[in-house]
Image: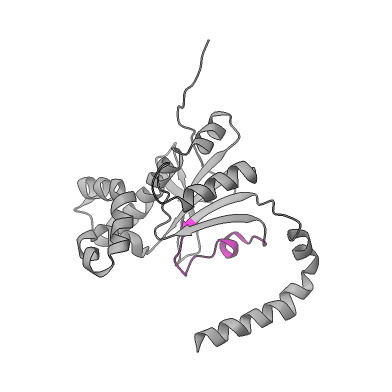
Amino acid sequence: MPIKRIIAGLNEFHDNYFITHRELFENLSQGQTPEVLFITCSDSRIDPFLITQSQPGDLFVIRNVGNIIPPYGSPHGAEGAGIEYAIQALNINDVVVCGHSHCGAMRGLLQIGSLAQQMPLVYDWLRQYAEPTRRLVMDNYKDYPSDKLLRIAIEQNVLTQIENLETHPIIRSRLHSGQLTLHAWIYEIETGEVFAYDANAGQFKILENRPFPVPNPLIGVYSE
């Protein structure tokens, strides 16, 4: 049974990894100081700690279907609460919104009508918070081949969610003061590569040795 394998893994973790990293976990028991808020999809093929080669305590992670960030004031408050805690209480200065190739949520978004009967909660989730992505893609790229259309939807959804993120008061305030940087990423499962949105080029580029931070929006710029 799969659960037996999971339990065996727990025992392996405790008897090997935990024992050799005991000092790390003792330090973590005193509190957390993550460096990055990492927002990504619930997809089982995505492991933020693995692809970034991070240690426990390095990332504050929020995951859901489609790496979606409801705008501030939305009835779904879990994501907003996590964002607020990460920035205010943990003083995180970098936020990554990471989509991924072959995203089932985005595939469903492009065929949204068929979801209503089979998965009504998924339908409601995508319809409410990813409709700007669907409308943009279908209005401007509907004649593209299906694989290309899916890639465009994945990329545009990350940018849509960055815009939603910017509606949160704590995000807006920290962006205004220059204390926060946003990053829009796509993880490609089949190659292991990560693409970051380069606003100057208007496209996602392979992320190698330098970041491509999302430019701060013009939020209440004051001049005397």
Outermost residue to the right: 23
Q: Nearer the viewer, residue 61 or 138?
A: 61
Give the magenta-colored segment's residue range: 40-55
The color scheme shown is: one colour
Q: Is residue 148 left or right of residue 91?
A: left
Q: Is residue 190 magenta?
A: no
Q: On the rendered structure, is 160 left or right of 196?
A: left
Q: Residue at x 33, y 59 (%)?
A: 106
Q: Is residue 6 above or below residue 157?
A: below
**x, y percentage for residue 183?**
51, 45
Residue 97 location (% of width, % of height)? 48, 50
Does 50 appear above or below 37?
Answer: below
Viewer-proximal residue among 91 and 150: 91
User: Percent from the top left, x then y, of residue 169?
Assistant: 49, 36
In this rendering, position of residue 147 left or right of residue 78: left
Residue lying at the far front in this picture: please name it: 75
Residue 107 visible in the picture: no
Q: Is residue 184 above or below residue 67?
A: above
Does any portion of residue 220 appear in the rendered image?
A: yes
